[in-house]
Every structure is written in structure tokens, then in C-alpha cells.
Image (tube, grey):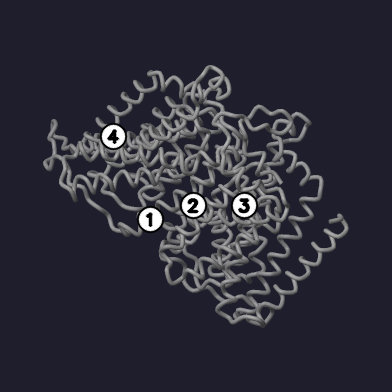
Amino acid sequence: MTLQLFVQLLINGLMIGGIYALVASGFTLILGVLQVFNFAQGHFYMLGAFIAYAVATVMGAPYIVAIIASLAGMAVLGILTYFSIIKWTLRSGFFHTMLVTVAFGTIIGQLAVLKFGYSTAVVAPLIESTLQFGGISLNPGKLIVMAGAIVVMVALWWFLKTKIGVAMMACAENREVACLQGINAEKVFWVTMAVGCGLCGIAGALVAPVLSASTNMGSQVFLKAMIVVMVGGTGSMSGALLAAFVVGIVESFAFQYVESFAPLVIFALVALLLYFRPGGLLGKPLPIPGQ
Amino acid sequence: MGIGNLVRSKRFWLGLVLVLAVALPFLIGAYRLQIFIFAITYSMLALAFRLTLNVGLPRFDVAAWWGVGAYTTAMLMLKANMSFWLTLPIAVVMSVVLGYVVFSVSIRRGMMVFMMFGMVFALAIQQVLGTVKFFGGWGGTPALPPVTIGSHVLNNKMWIYYVGLAFLLFNVVVYYLLFNSRIGRAWNAIGSGLRLASSLGVDVVGYRLANVLVSNAFLALAGSFSVMYQAMVLPTTYGFQRSIYVMMYVVLGGFLSPLAGPIIGAVLLTSLSEAMRAVQQYEPIVTGILTVLIIMFIPQGLTGLLHGRVRPLFLRLWPAKAGVQVKGPAGSTQVSGPDEKAGG
């Protein structure tokens, strides 16, 4: 393997890993705090990409505005989802809230198909030229995705240290005790939905210039997020971050060498990991109902 | 109403449905009969989904195992020139053995990992079916030979319908016997209180694995049956979308009747999607909205209405305060885990 190929595969892996990290950490946050298995996560990601397309390409606004618009749009949609659907089914239990998000995701997905069809929407890249770095040419768009993902992860880490962030972690730890300490669970829940869905919006907006937006991009990423969550340990945030980059890099290299058997390779690796390290890579998952 | 009365009326309804089902080909045309053949297949999938729900394991890989059955039968018929009936046991064994290999590890790690691992497997198997030349690739296999009994060729819609009905009846009878056996009682114990069951000495992992493998066997049977009326098998038929629809059938039909609910849901939603054929692109939206409304207002589904255990509408309109714990079975400390509502 040449150095050129190796570096490019590594960059690809880190880029897609960053996207997985954003989607999976949003998913884990909602799962841990609300105890809702959010099936619509992939659809939020897809909508984020299309909002970026609408703002950046159709309206001609700068790319940074598109990212903020995606974040805001998905956060608002997440809050709306919480107050219109999830709030009313929380009492029915884990299974029912999961099913309601499945149905909601189906509705969003089909609405997007009605609006955008099956074709892809391309967002113009920020920098057209390629970077030359010691004989290795790199696509700057991928570096921007990576940098964006890291910035967002740092922002999320900072957010979880604020008062509301600590309240979220407390709710994830033990909801009843958190309520007894005077934490407003209702507020924590809708903030969590906003953050979790907003992360997906950012991920979609970041990926739009590199991979272009299409209506079926959501389910692929959702399934990859499942893998990330399993590898990182169910309900563990830091595990999900580490696992996202591991899965991204493994997938990038597997796709180069075995092409369409890459899902099978990843599946086998996940099976081995579950056998030898049931708690995930870091091995300290949060308690989740139905274990 | 007295208990005796209730049982009598239940038998009456059961008999009526059976008579109607047998007489159906004489009442409607061949085109409508095809929809009922689809509905029978989907009923079998929904029953298998409902079966694993009994031990608190929702599964979203239903369509993948359905595909395993269909591909096993199709490949044996095409490449080995085997009779359809001979391929049935092979498909079942294939599905069970593969299921054991796939799930023997993940089932120990609880419901979440089981579910997610199943979805990842579904993705992988679809890729394999689509890319390996032996299976015919994304374009599907060449035309399948028709199914025969002796020298009689079963290419008539009516015969296919009756074979499907026999398959479905076989499913229902086996499920009924299982539910009323020692194994079924252990399954129900696990479904209604995982910790209690395990503390009473029920082998949770073993019984869960047995349940999933039985479900796999019936999914493979449904797959083999679907080969009867399909001209070819396509990998895209066995995708994630179908698994989601199967879930919706079970939600619509209801959880309280483990046998009638899934069948009612499958028949109703299949008819709905057929009725909306002209505006096909809106069909998933209508189905999705219907499912959301059902879960919000009648969480026990349509058959839940018959059981009279449905909360009045105005009570459901006012949700519980967030964080209030729903009392779990036998003092379990879970915050309304899946066990409560999903258990049979």
C-alpha cells in the first residue's frame, strides 16, 4: 500500500467517523436521558443535509449559515417531536416510544421522498482545489468535516458541564432521584431532544458538500450508528466517540479491500467484540431498560 | 357476560372466520385473492415478530430471515432441481442454524444489543445476497420453476391461497400449543418480569434463544411460501422497510391477543396499502400517521379494544408527569420497561 492511499483511507475513515460520532452521540444522549430508542435519528440527519442544500445552494447563503440553519431547524423539530409525540407515549413504556419513533421516521422519510425524489442534491464545496501535502493530495472538504466534527464534540463536552448538562447526566443516571433533587425532568427532556436532533442536523450539513444529500442516506447512517453504539457500549458517550472513529477507519479500509463485503466484515468484528468485551470498548455502559 | 358465554362466542367467531377464509376464493376474483396471499405471508411474519415480543425482545431483522428462507428454497429449486416440499425442512434448518450462530452471543447482552445486532445482520445479509453472483445479484434470480404436487402444477391462485392458508393454520396451531405448554409459560414469565423469572430459576438466556429460533423457523417457512407466488426473488424485497411494516401490523392488531392481533393487523394494513395503490407515494405517510395515532390513543391496539382494557381517551390525553415511575411488575425498579405492555 502506498503512503498516498493509506493517508487518503485514513482521512476518509476519520471523516466518516466524525459523522458517525455526531449521529451516535445524539442517539446515545436521547437513549440515556429519555430512555427512548430514537429510530428517526437517521431521518433527522437526512433532513439536516437537505436544509444545508436549501440554504447554501438554493438561497446562496454562506456555508456557515447553512450549518447553523440545519442545527436550529433540527433542534426545533426535535422539540416539536418531543411535545407532539414522545411526551404522550413516555408512560406507555420503552417499547411503545420506540415504535412511535419508527412510525414518525417513516413519515419524515416519505415526506422527503415526495419533496426531493430519489435524486441527489449536491452542495457546492467550499474550496474547489485539492491540497498538496508532501506529495499527497487531500480533499479539503473532508478535512473541514473532520474539523467541524471535532469542534462540535468539544462544544458538546462543554455543554454537558453546564448546569442543564449536569441535570441531563443526572436524569440518565437515575431519573427518580434527579427529580427528587428538584430537577425539572420535562425541561431536561426537551433540551435533550433538541441537542440530540441538532447534532444530527450538524452532521447532515457537514456531510452535504462531500457526499451530497439524498433521501436514503439516513437509514445507512442509522445502522452505522447502531454499530457504533454496540461497539462503544450501550449508553456510553465516551465509548460512542471512540467507537465512531474506530468503525469509520475500519469501514474505510474494509471498503477498499473487500468492497461490498465490508458490512459482513464489520458484522463479524462486532460479533467478536460482543463475545470478548460485552460492555463495549470502554466497558462501562449506562443502565438501559430491558437488559 | 358469563365466562361460558364468552367462550362460546369466541368459538363462534373463530369458526366464522375459518369458514370465510376457506370460502374466500369463491367469493372474490383472482386479483383480490393475490392481496390475501400477500396478507397471509405478512401475517406469518407478524406472528413471528409477536412471538419474540413474548420474551421482551423486539426484532427488526424479520425481513432478513424471511429472505434467508426464500433464498434457500429458491436456490435449491433452481440449482439442485429439488422439489419445493423437500426444500421446506432444509430452509427451516438453515434459518435455525444460522440464527443460532448469529444470536447465541448477542442474546446474552440484553434486549438492546439483540435488536441492534439483528439490524446489522440484516444489512450484512442483504449486501451478501445482492453482490454474490451465486445468489443472482441485485437483479434477482432467473424465473423460478412452478411448485408441483405429484404431477399437478400449483400455478393457480386458488391453490396457492389454500397452501398459504394451510401454512398459516400450521403456524397458529403450533404457536397455540407452545403458548399453552411449559415452555410458553416460561416465555410469558420472562416477558412479564425478567428479573422475577430469572430469580425463580427460569433459564432466561436459554428460553429466549429457543424463542428466537422458533421465530426464525417460522420466518423461513414464510419465506419458502413466498417463493410459490413470486416469479423471482429480489434482495430488495427483504430489506429494513418490510421489517418496519411488520412492526406496524403488530401494533395495529394489538398486543393482548398474541395470535389474532398480528393477523388482523396484517390483513387490514395490506388491504389499506392495496386500496391506496393509485396514490402509492402517500401510503407510508398514512400508515405511519395511523400507527402514531394508535400508539398514542389505543396503545393496546385494535384487539385491545375487545379486551376492554383500554384507557378512556380523555385519560390518555393528559400524560403522566415526566419522571413519574410507572409501577413495574413485582416491584421491579425499571422505569416502565418494555416488559409491561409487551408481555402476553
Mark 3 and mark 1: Cα distance apart in space = 27 Å
Which of the two discs, 4 and 3, sits closer to the camera? 3
Residue occupying image coordinates x 36% and y 52%: A216
What residue is pinned by disc 4?
A: A10
Give the residue type at disc 2: Ile
Q: Residues within 10 Å of mark 1 (few under 14, many from 20)?
A: some
Which of the two discs, 2 and 1, sits closer to the camera? 1
Q: Callout 1: helix, strand or loop?
A: helix
Above-or-below relation of B24 to A247: below
Which of the two discs, 2 and 3, sits closer to the camera? 3
Give the residue type at disc 4: Leu
What residue is pinned by disc 1?
A: A111
What residue is pinned by disc 3?
A: B49
Q: Residues within 10 Å of mark 4 (few under 14, many from 20)?
A: some
Q: Chain of mark 1?
A: A
Q: Chain of mark 3?
A: B
What residue is pinned by disc 2?
A: B125
Q: Callout 2: helix, strand or loop?
A: helix
Q: Chain of mark 2?
A: B
Mark 4 and mark 1: Cα distance apart in space = 36 Å
Left or right, A87 with reference to A53:
right
